[in-house]
Image: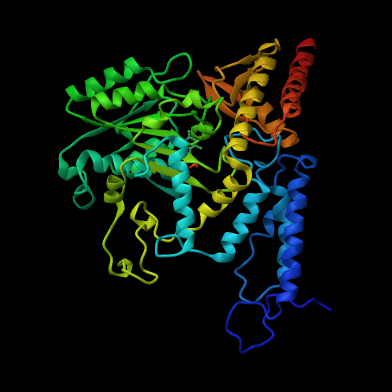
Amino acid sequence: MPVASPVRRTDPEAQNLDPADWRELRAQGHRMLDDMFDHMAGLRDQPVWRPPPAAARARFREPLPAEPGDLAESYAIFRRDVLPFGSGNAHPGFMGWAQGAGTPVGMLAEMLAAGLNSNLGGRDHMAIEVERQVLAWVRQMFGFPGTASGLFVTGASQANFVAVLVARTRAVGAEVRGEGLARSGLRLSAYASKGVHGCVPRALDMAGIGAGSLRLIETDADHRMDLGALRAAIAQDRRAGFTPFLLVGTAGTVDVGAIDDLSGLADIATAERIAFHVDGALGGLAVLSPELAPRVAGIERCDSLAFDFHKWGHVPYDAGYILVRDAGLHRATFASPAAYLARAERGLAAGDWWPCDYGPDLSRGFRALKTWFTLKTYGSEALGQAMAANCGLAQALAARVDATPELERLAPVGLNVVCFHHRLLSDAQNAELVADLQIAGEVAPSLTTVGGRTAIRAAIVNHRTCLQDIETLVESVLSQGRAMLRVPAEEAAR
Ligand SMILES: *Cc1c(COP(=O)(O)O)cnc(C)c1O
């Protein structure tokens, strides 16, 4: 006999979506929770990644379900077809791209937030106070004044976009929102290093300023922006009639983890009277480690900062953040009068801080709760220690690469990213090797290009990664390299 669905209503008169029998749903929920704890506790016993099988994909091409289904059955599909085939970023062997690993506490907080189903666009309720608490902590982390404003957004891509819009307001005035940029007659120009993340030119594109207005400044041997070249580019633009309005420094470039000279950039931005923004998506949170903080010195001087709690902060996706020094400018960039958003002296429509005044979103989820729980439970020091440990592992990997004749490092290691290649393999073969490792499922580095060469890129972001995983990476690259070299060698012998 089929088990009745915990969500199927037995009372046909009932029009709501709650279960008829909460006891069944409760039992089902507890099973789900236990399974997810088991999943997290057993990550190391699973492959980092395995390609989703065709049968699993096929089960997600079904027509829209019109009739109620059984929750337990849907959950069985999730367990079989979804859970084992994630992208692997929670796994200790994951070193691809730059992704956070999540925590069990973050997972629980997500559940609590979903249970509350708060909308953090504004109004007077406690969830807003939680987000304000996190804002106060963020100011403290980065040495910003108590008047600075800030906001959770999806990720650093969106945070960088918000920063570009705030800088546009600063340069052109809030009238630009109504009149558009063309009316101002200004030709704006922005500056970032060649290592800048692709979301920054896209932010200028989306802001109507144009990706082409971003000058990509040459970098030095450490992949940091060349300050002389920056000054020259600004001077040349001024002579050509441009209005330099924004300088973007990067705290941890996505390719190699390079950190621009943020103090030097702050000096130039001050002298040139242009907005100084820092993209700290990857490395901004290094301020939480006394060991790493000196590397991002100067970050406290920026006008705005984008960073991700979902990367090195390990808050579950998504949890990006934008911090803005001048709250008035920030508000002037987004606040709009709308009758349905009118503020009241008292009642639910009261409250003097409405996040919808500071960003493009009106309805917003409770990202602050999982961040609050993460910081309350682990503490900022432990998060900083995990980052410093990652950087120690990156140094260990760099040392192993340097000591191995078949391998060659392709960039200095200034943070937690190591780029190298197998000397005896072509660029195409190095790329093949990375795909082979990902499919083998023990360790998953990713690929990038450094100085025109294809690089095996290990971004050590995961708090679960340990020395054994670094060793596995080196051994796997070497053994896979030997296997790839064997074939042509035999062919050549014939
Ligand atoms: C990851 C990253 C981004 C984009 O952040 P999202 O959170 O993925 O939107 C931007 N800049 C840098 C340096 C990054 O590492």
Figure check: 7 above or below 391: below
Quadrant in which the C terminus is drawn: top right
In this rendered view, identify the residue nearer to me: 179 or 108. Answer: 108
Quadrant in which the N terminus is drawn: bottom right
Give the left or right position of residue 164, taking residue 452 as reference: left
Figure check: 325 above or below 5: above
Task: Examine the rendering and report whether any part of residue 280 can be seen.
Answer: yes
Task: Examine the rendering and report whether any part of residue 80 can be seen.
Answer: no
- Rendered residue at 68%/78% (across/down): 8
Total of numbered circles in the picture?
Answer: 0
- Looking at the rendering, which quadrant does residue 200 occupy? top left
Q: Percent x, y for residue 137?
A: 48, 44
In this rendered view, identify the residue nearer to me: 186 or 56. Answer: 186
- Rendered residue at 61%/55% (across/down): 109
- Looking at the rendering, which quadrant does residue 59 occupy? bottom right
Q: Percent x, y for residue 58?
A: 68, 57
- Rendered residue at 74%/75% (across/down): 23
- Return the residue found at the far bottom: 13
Give the left or right position of residue 475, taking residue 357 as reference: right
In this rendered view, identify the residue nearer to me: 49 or 171. Answer: 171
Q: Percent x, y for residue 71?
A: 71, 69
- Rendered residue at 63%/29% (across/down): 390
